[in-house]
Amino acid sequence: MQRDDDYIRSLLFEFVEQEDWLILVTDTLSSNKEDRKRRYHVLLLCDAGLMTQVGNSTFRLTSQGHDFVSALQDEGIWQKTKDAVAKTGGNATITIIQQLAVGYLKKKIETQTGVEL
């Protein structure tokens, strides 16, 4: 299965909008295709340190995950991040995508406030 960065972004937004901090993810091989895709991407987020597993099928966002979501909320920053990855051939790790998005957010804040971060 291919990693889908837009899907990861939508999952992260879904998770932060939930009322509860616990995220339940189906954990059976008989799950449908969408449930398997969801679990796979949640596990990728865990691999990257953006989520952590707290129970058998229960996860939560890490502080680093919340920081990433903050950077991704600006559609312009997300587009710049995707464009930067595309310019290099379209391949980047989640960590690089995160660093780019946070870097663009940092630059935006510096430009608007005049405070160097």
Image (cartoon, rainbow, N blue to C red):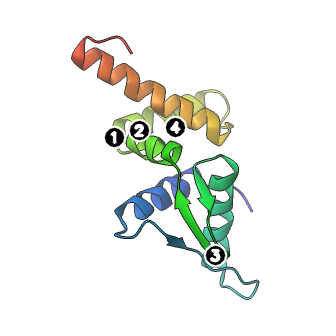
- Which amino acid type is marked by label 1? Asp
Looking at the rendered structure, the secondary structure element under dot 2 is helix
Rendered location of residue 79, percent (x, y): 43, 38
Give the CA distance from mark 3 to mark 2: 27 Å
* Mark before the other along the chain sequence, 3 or 2: 3
Say whether marks 2 and 1 touch (CB < 8 Å): yes
Depth check: give the residue in front, 71 or 89: 71
* Mark before the other along the chain sequence, 1 or 4: 1
Looking at the rendered structure, the secondary structure element under dot 1 is loop
- Residue furthest to the left: 113
Name the residue tied to disc 1.
74
Name the residue tied to disc 2.
71
Rendered location of residue 55, percent (x, y): 64, 72
Mark nearer the viewer, 1 or 4: 1
Q: Residue at x 55, y 55 (%)?
A: 8
Depth check: give the residue in front, 107 or 25: 25
Say whether marks 3 and 2 touch (CB < 8 Å): no
Side of 111 where 65 appears, left or right: right
- Which amino acid type is marked by label 2? Ala
Looking at the rendered structure, the secondary structure element under dot 3 is loop
Give the CA distance from mark 1 to mark 4: 13 Å
Name the residue tied to disc 3.
57
- Which amino acid type is marked by label 4? Lys
Mark nearer the viewer, 1 or 3: 3
In the picture, residue 51 is in which quadrant?
bottom right
- Tag of residue 82: 4
Rendered location of residue 22, percent (x, y): 49, 69
